[in-house]
């Protein structure tokens, strides 16, 4: 048996009248973790305060003296997959950095 030939050059005359629904093509994988890390990085860049100041204010607001600049660096680094910023710390970061746009 011969293989059937599929014609790809002929236009479909009925496509305008009866449109064919095709599944959407997703070219990029949805990486929410990476988007959050980029957002944290953007917040840190846009803030007039230094990372040390932000970390100190966050430590005071959360009553967590062990919070440091290194933790902020880990939360904004896409290469470091082990550290994810918890929601409550993200909210504190937004408030301390005055980044209501985020």
Image (cartoon, rainbow, N blue to C red):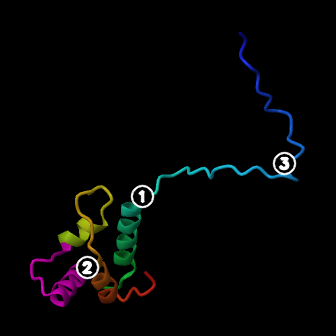
Which residue lies under the disc numbered 2? 89
Q: Quadrant of residue 87?
A: bottom left
Which residue lies under the disc numbered 1? 31
Mark closer to the observer (3, 2): 3
**Which type of secondary structure does the marked residue at label 3 adopt?**
loop
Question: With respect to residue 68, does 18 lie above or below?
Answer: above
Who's the residue at 18% across and 84% down the image?
56
Residue 61, position as x, y percentages in the image: 19, 90
Residue 14, position as x, y percentages in the image: 88, 46
Which residue lies under the disc numbered 3? 15
Taking depth in this image into account, of 69 and 25 the one nearest to the observer is: 25
**Which type of secondary structure does the marked residue at label 1 adopt?**
loop
Distance in Å between CA atoms under marks 1 and 3? 34 Å
Who's the residue at 26% across and 80% down the image?
88
**Residues packed near mark 2 inside 10 Å, few (<14), some (14 to 19) or many (20 plus):** some
Mark positioned earlier in the residue sequence (1 or 3): 3
Q: Is residue 61 magenta?
A: yes
**Magenta span covers which residues?**
51-69
Distance in Å between CA atoms under marks 1 and 2? 20 Å
Taking depth in this image into account, of 53 and 3 the one nearest to the observer is: 3
Mark positioned earlier in the residue sequence (3 or 2): 3
């Amino acid at each position: 048996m011969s293989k059937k030939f599929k014609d790809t050059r002929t236009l479909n005359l009925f496509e305008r009248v009866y449109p064919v629904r095709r599944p959407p093509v997703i070219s990029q994988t949805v990486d929410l973790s990476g988007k959050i890390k980029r957002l944290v990085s953007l917040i840190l860049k846009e803030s007039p305060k230094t990372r040390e100041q932000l970390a100190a204010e966050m430590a005071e607001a959360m009553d967590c003296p062990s919070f440091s600049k290194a933790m902020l660096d880990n939360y904004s680094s896409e290469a470091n997959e082990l550290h994810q910023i918890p929601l409550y710390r993200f909210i504190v970061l937004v408030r301390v950095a005055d980044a209501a746009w985020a």
